Image (spheres, coloured by chain):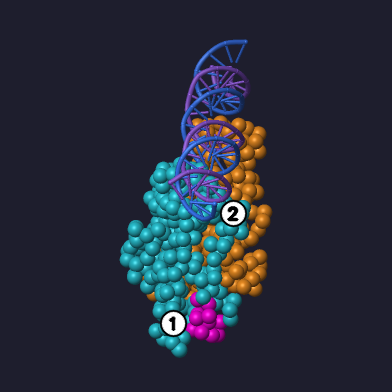
Chain colours: A cyan, B orange, C purple, D blue
Amino acid sequence: MSGRENVTAKRLMDACETLLCETDTLEDLTTRRIAIQAEATPSAIAYHFGSQEELITAVAERVYRRLNAERLSLLQKAVDRRAPAPADLEEVIAALVGPSIRWATDPKSSYPVLAHFTSMAQSHRDDVAHYRRIIDDVEHHRAFIPHLKRIAPWLDEVDIGWRLNCALGIRSQVTRNRPRTALLTNYQLDLDNVDLVIGRMVEVIAPMFRR
Amino acid sequence: MSGRENVTAKRLMDACETLLCETDTLEDLTTRRIAIQAEATPSAIAYHFGSQEELITAVAERVYRRLNAERLSLLQKAVDRRAPAPADLEEVIAALVGPSIRWATDPKSSYPVLAHFTSMAQSHRDDVAHYRRIIDDVEHHRAFIPHLKRIAPWLDEVDIGWRLNCALGIRSQVTRNRPRTALLTNYQLDLDNVDLVIGRMVEVIAPMFRR
DNA sequence: TGGGGATTTCGAACAGCATTCGAAATCCGT
DNA sequence: ACGGATTTCGAATGCTGTTCGAAATCCCCA
């Protein structure tokens, strides 16, 4: 069971990812619809993944990995550019929030998968352990801590972690609460202008790490 | 239809609120369970509210109103204390984030209702209009804008709105992603210490509104 | 090339869900 | 005490995710 190199298993994941991007509401994503899109049967989902939930989790994990890779690559670039001196603060922040902003704006990206997944994980937080592995997969976020610490050595690790967490909150708000963001800024900010939004975020987050 | 002064309608709302606070996962909240708790039948939900979703929405709106009242009352107090001079920035921020933090920490509060509701609204965002009335009910958040503008007159309204939005993002992160917050701060922050957490938030948000 | 055990697919069935609807019951002003 | 409006109820409908045994397929080895 749960062979991921199987052909139909992969087709199920692809179908699930496609549907997760297409449908607005999670409850329209039924096992039967996924099965039809993948030219399989609902039983195949149970056989390969155990349940629909675990299929979605597997898909989310796959997408999440892509996003993380992009994020960490940007961080590495920022670090390398100034090494051995500390990285540029604004560049590090842009690496932290940039990919999410870009994905959330790009209609062709699989960002909706992550949006749906996190909201699903919020609703079904019984088997917490399984979800947290992905959602609280803060390992790659932790990668930012040492570099931020070099930039702001007067802050201790708790301070850095706290500020990092706050930055993530701002990122979530902008990517997942677009209408609210638009409304509060009186629709006078072009939220589709990725660089402008990232700049605005840097402008707010950077001071947290300055004296 | 949809009479809210009816006895069983009120009992249904109370039962729903109770269950929303008790159950961890939203899918355990079924019409039958609500009906049983309210000593009624599932049909009663349809009759009085139209659907389970609308019942939950009504309950959330009721809870939301209580939270808003607390928030605006604190804002008013902060304003009155310094009037006619501009209010104290840190006090205004504490009014903005304090009630949520307090509710999220208090196990007897109805905060879980709001957590469940917002995550439900994220999953079912087809009839956007109905949800936004509550979620993007930014009217009461807008109330903070003129006071923040007086405190930081060098910022234009868009800047203020943007920063306010960022502050709300930080608040959501802390109240709704506790495990992540705990992990990033290495479990060295007592997240049950309300005043300490509010202080930490003020410490991060206040600089956004300073020169 | 053919046989046979393991892997994979399928279809039918099950329990649970939200919601609908017509009939019963209750309420309440006259 | 009557009678229309409001409210409650129970059965039925169509959907859901999942289970399970049987069929089909694959693939290694003789």
Q: What amino acid is found at the position of numbered circle 2 in the picture? A: Arg
Residue at the spot of label 1 = A79
Vertical order, B144 against A37 (above or below): below
- The residue closer to the viewer here, B194 or B126, is B126
- The residue closer to the viewer here, B1 or B46, is B46
Q: What amino acid is found at the position of numbered circle 1 in the picture? A: Val
Residue A208 in sight from this viewpoint: yes
Q: In this view, does C9 lie to the left or right of A187?
A: right
Residue at the spot of label 2 = A125
Residue drawn at x 41%, y 75% is A74
Vertical order, A155 against B197 (above or below): below
The disc at residue B69 is: none
Q: Mark 2 lies on which chain?
A: A
Vertical order, B199 against A123 (above or below): below
Mark 2 residue crowding within 10 angstroms, few (<14) / some (14–19) / many (20+): some
Counting from the top left corner in percent of width and height, residue B99 is at 58, 60
Residue drawn at x 64%, y 54% is B109
Q: Are marks 1 and 2 in contact (CB under 8 Å)?
A: no
Mark 1 residue crowding within 10 angstroms, few (<14) / some (14–19) / many (20+): some
Which contiguous range is marked in magenta?
A: A144-155
Where residue B18 sits, quadrant-wise, is top right
Residue drawn at x 56%, y 58% is A131
Hey, which residue is sitting farthest bottom in the picture? A84
Considering only order in the chain, which callout, 2 or 1, is on the residue closer to the N terminus?
1
